[in-house]
């Protein structure tokens, strides 16, 4: 019986050691795979971060370009409106002067007839 128990115990120990070695190898493989995935994820994150920075720079440049263009357009429209206002004012002044001249002539003619 003792020899039988010893053989059984030895068999159990060998079985346990084999399982432990297999489990240990699996853990090592999974750890390696996990580390590899983490490294890939970090590299991808850095790539995406770099892409995002480039997109932000491009966006900011386009936004500035559009703002500058809009500002120039606004100044152009403002200048055109001011020029139109000046022309209109001169035209009104001319019409007022013509009216005043006509009224004056009418008044002079009226006084000649009186």
Image (spheres, helix red, strand yellow):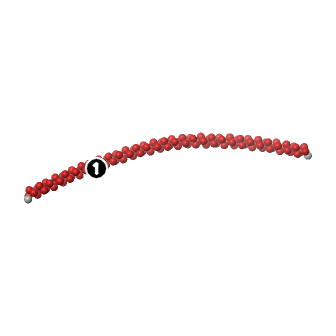
Horizontal side of 75 relative to 113 (left or right) equals right
* Residue 10 percent coordinates (x, y): 85, 42
Horizontal side of 88 relative to 103 (left or right) equals right
Dot 1 falls on a residue whose secondary structure is helix
Residue that protrudes farthest toward the bottom in the picture: 114
The image quadrant of residue 66 is top left
* Residue 47 percent coordinates (x, y): 56, 41
The image quadrant of residue 27 is top right
- Assess disc 1: are there few (<14), some (14-19) or many (≥20) residues with their C-alpha within 10 Å of its C-alpha: few
Horizontal side of 57 relative to 42 (left or right) equals left
Q: Which residue is the site of mark 1?
A: 85
Taking the spot 48% from the left edge, 42% from the top edge, the residue there is 58
Taking the spot 90% from the left edge, 43% from the top edge, the residue there is 3
* Residue 17 percent coordinates (x, y): 79, 42
* Residue 45 percent coordinates (x, y): 58, 43
Taking the spot 24% from the left edge, 49% from the top edge, the residue there is 90
The total of numbered circles placed on residues is 1
The image quadrant of residue 37 is top right
Give the position of the C terminus as an image quadrant. bottom left
Residue that protrudes farthest toward the right in the picture: 1
Horizontal side of 58 relative to 10 (left or right) equals left
Relative vertical location of residue 64 with respect to residue 112 in this rendering, above or below? above
Taking the spot 26% from the left edge, 50% from the top edge, the residue there is 88
């Amino acid at each position: 019986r003792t020899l039988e128990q010893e053989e059984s115990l030895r068999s159990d120990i060998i079985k346990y050691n084999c399982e432990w070695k297999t489990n240990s190898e699996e853990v090592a493989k999974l750890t390696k795979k996990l580390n590899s995935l983490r490294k890939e994820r970090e590299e991808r994150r850095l790539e995406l971060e770099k892409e995002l920075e480039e997109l932000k720079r491009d966006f900011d440049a386009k936004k500035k370009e559009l703002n500058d263009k809009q500002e120039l357009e606004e100044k152009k429209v403002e200048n055109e409106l001011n020029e139109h206002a000046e022309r209109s004012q001169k035209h009104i002044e001319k019409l007022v002067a013509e009216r005043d001249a006509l009224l004056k002539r009418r008044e002079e003619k009226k006084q000649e007839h009186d």
